[in-house]
Image: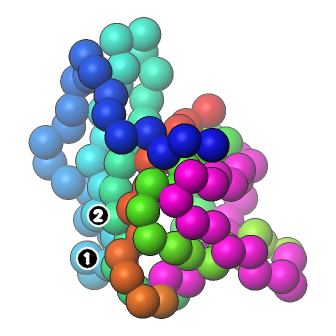
Amino acid sequence: MAVTDKFDNVALTTKANVYFDGKCVSHGFVLADGTRKSVGVVLPSSLTFGTAAPEIMECVGGRCKVRMKGEEEWRTYTAGESFSVPGDASFDILVEDEPFHYICHYG
């Protein structure tokens, strides 16, 4: 999978969403067709995220390990890879050495 490096014709929310005392920062945006997404970075840390709607997390830089709720195994993702998270779920993410950059595709 190629890394998405640009979105055209978007409405960007300029105020950042800051989570976990600044360990995760993202900006939401809406495409011309109404599709919502966010782009952000997770600094080295171990965090647990919850979801309301299903999400696809696209890795655009760095590396992370992910463990879905109820699973034992950690899976590693790098640039060009993605993982899906069901709605009303949670996952653990471990970022170790360098910031992890992502695009979150909602729905």
Q: Compare residues 64 and 13 and report the one nearer the observer.
A: 64
**Residue positioned 28% across, 21% down in the render:** 8
Which residue has dot 1 on it? Answer: 22
Q: Residues within 10 Å of mark 2 (few under 14, many from 20)?
A: some
**18 on left or right of 39:** left
Instruction: Assign a secondary structure to mark 2.
Output: strand
Instruction: Assign a secondary structure to mark 1.
Output: helix
Hey, what amino acid is under mark 2? Val
Mark 1 to mark 2 CA distance (whole Å): 6 Å
Q: Residues within 10 Å of mark 1 (few under 14, many from 20)?
A: few
**92 on left or right of 71:** left
Q: Quadrant of residue 38?
A: top left
User: Which image quarter holds the C terminus?
Assistant: top right
**Residue positioned 27% across, 47% down in the render:** 27
Does the stretch in magenta take in 20?
A: no
Q: Quadrant of residue 42?
A: bottom left
Q: Are marks 1 and 2 in contact (CB under 8 Å)?
A: yes
User: Which image quarter holds the N terminus?
Assistant: top right
Which residue has dot 2 on it? Answer: 25
Residue 80: x %, y % from top left: 56, 52
| Magenta range | 71-95
Residue 14: x %, y % from top left: 13, 42
In this view, 95 is above or below 28: below
